[in-house]
Image (tube, rainbow, N blue to C red):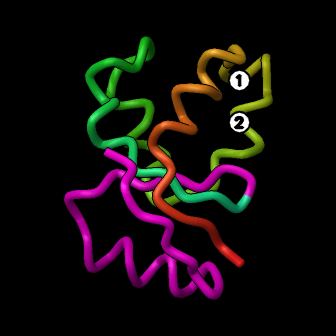
Amino acid sequence: MASTNIAFADKKEFEKFAQENPSRVLVIYNKSVFDVADFLDEHPGGPAFILDFQNKDITSIFHDDEYHEHSHTALSILQKHKIGYIQ
């Protein structure tokens, strides 16, 4: 699904975009923005877990092994859904 490379000036601009595009399931990881809507049903933890973090920065939880462990494969999958970045 990732087909654009949107440059958001800041988090406020990202939040406006997210509000104007409610069908997108957006997350931020290391200042990159991802639309993971088409990954919801494939997520091993189920869609609810992702939806809890919709429009939020997931950087810290992505690397917190006690909270929610992710493999290198998970990061590769995430990269396929990149739509932009926050400057």
Image vertical order of residue 26 relative to residue 19, above or below: above
The amino acid at mark 2 is Ile
Mark 2: give few (<14), some (14-19) or many (20+) Cα within 10 Å. Answer: some
Residue 67 disc label: 1
Look at 78% across and 17% down and name the residue there: 66
Look at 53% across and 64% down and name the residue there: 84
Q: Quadrant of the C terminus?
A: bottom right
Residue 22 in picture, x, y percent from top left: 23, 65
Look at 44% across and 16% down and name the residue there: 45
The residue beneath circle 2 is: 61
Give me the C-alpha separation between circle 1 and circle 2: 7 Å
Look at 52% across and 86% down and name the residue there: 13
The amino acid at mark 1 is Tyr
Confirm or deny contact between disc 1 and disc 2 (CB under 8 A). Answer: yes
Q: Quadrant of the N terminus?
A: top left
Per the image, label 1 sits on a secondary structure element best described as loop
Span shown in magenta: 1-30
